[in-house]
Amino acid sequence: MGHIRRNILIANALSNSSLQPDILLASGALEATRFTLPKGTDRLVLPALCKGPDGQYGSRRFQMPLAEMINLRRYILRAGLSAFNPDLLIVDNVACGANMELDATLAYLRAKGDCRIVLGLRDILDEPEVVASEWKKTRRFETIRKYFDEIWIYGDPAVYNPVEAYQFPPDIAAKVYFTGYLDQKTRLDALVPDDKTNPSGHFKLPDHPFVFCTLGGGQDGTRLGETFVSALPSDTSGTLLTGPHMDSKAQSRLFLKALSYPNLQVMNFLPEPAQWLEQADCVVGMGGYNSVSEILAFGKPALIVPRVSPRKEQLIRAERLQEMGLIDMIHPNILNESYLKRWIEKNMGQPARDFRTQIRLDGLDHIRHRFEAIFREDAYSISEHFVPVNIFSEKRKETKKCLASPTS
């Protein structure tokens, strides 16, 4: 879910550029069809992958072996890219895609020579030793060196510097641009009138103070969701967003429990939760990039309960932001109902803060400016992987295109 929201946010920034690109968002998440897309943007939905508890990929819906699934996605991407002929390709997170599904496509685009290829990375990937092992095994630096023109890191090195932490070689470090975190408040500006008056179907924004709990995609948020429901003070309203991928039995338990709590509403999906974040007194959530970026953008008092397995990414992010005094965090192994109830009672009614004096939240502006600067440097070639974009070039008198990388 975070990958989709992040790339739609980037697509929106690019769509507002003076180059007015056409953008193609390639994603393996069916939820991509439920989001309102920016002008000039459409989507290519791939057969979906999912990650198991061990962090390994598998098919989300098909019963075919993983190797066949990857070959199917590889063929769709290769055919789609050939037809779309992007000028800019932004690959999200994994340079060669899931299980090397992009290797042939990257080779094709580099051989064509008229597509700029960018790797987009979140601020934190995992513990340095884990990243070093994975990148060595998959020859990640060699792939970046061979195919990628730039690396955009959607974060602030004052919070975490992956170039240092993951020991990028000098020639790879030279490709890096730190954009700053992506300001999620801009999603409010993109709302159409229907979204503002009817933001989530029959669910309504509470008209009194409330606490908002968000579990990301939901696949590993069951314990936090159940603790939140039990901890919600009787005089406090709460909204729980489970995420569409929570186990169906766990989701049913939460919905049934909410029937006994008149001050609680439970939802499994919101196309746009920004209005809830804007109105909430405080936020409880997991520590994914997108969730944390939302919290930083809106400046709400927040308690982060990070995922700690199979990756430590969320834990590292939460610990660092707590050290900077921007959020509170608690390890999921020691989370309990009484602690969460006390935290909610303490933070209800606390004012929002502006974190922009402490960290960079202007990533979308930097992305748009860098995008335009690339075309000024080379008006003939740009490519974006997993957020496809079409750009009209006065020099070539033809439409340019960009593609964005698929997510599972």
Image (tube, rainbow, N blue to C red):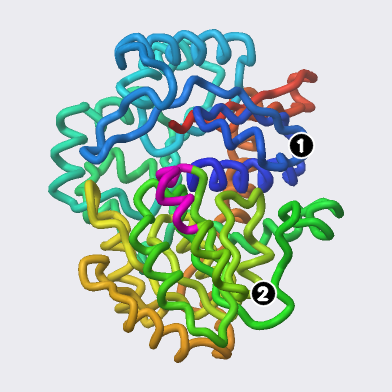
The 10 Å Cα crowd at callout 2, few under 14, some 14 to 19, many 20 or more, is: some
Count neighbours of disc 1 (C-alpha within 10 A) and say few if under 14, some if 14 to 19, many if 20 or more: some
Residue 395 coordinates in the image, percent (x, y)? 75, 24
Left or right? Give the position of 333 relative to 384.
left
**Residue at horizontal 25%, vertical 31%?**
56
Quadrant in which residue 72 is drawn: top left
Are the residues tagged 1 and 2 within 8 Å (C-beta)? Answer: no
Could you say which quadrant of the image residue 375 lies in? top right
> Is 319 drawn above or below residue 316 in the view shown?
below
What residue sits 33% from the left and 74% below the top?
329
Q: Where is residue 223 in the image (x, y as percent from the top left)?
A: 33, 60
Q: In which quarter of the image is residue 54?
A: top left
Q: Name the residue under label 1.
A: 20
Q: Position of residue 359 (x, y in %)?
A: 46, 71
For residue 57, side relative to residue 165 (left or right): right
Q: Which amino acid does label 2 sit on?
A: Gln
Relative depth, front residue between 220 and 109: 220
Circle 2 residue: 279
Residue 39 on the magenta segment: no
Q: Quadrant of the C terminus?
A: top left
What amino acid type should be assigned to the residue bearing mark 1?
Gln
Closer-to-camera residue (55/335): 335
Q: What stretch is highlighted in magenta?
A: 245-254
Relative horizontal placement of residue 399, taking residue 120 as reference (left or right): right
Q: How many labels does the image show?
A: 2
Residue 1 higher or lower than 138, as above or below: below
Q: Earlier in the sequence, mark 1 or mark 2?
A: 1
1 vs 2, front mark: 2
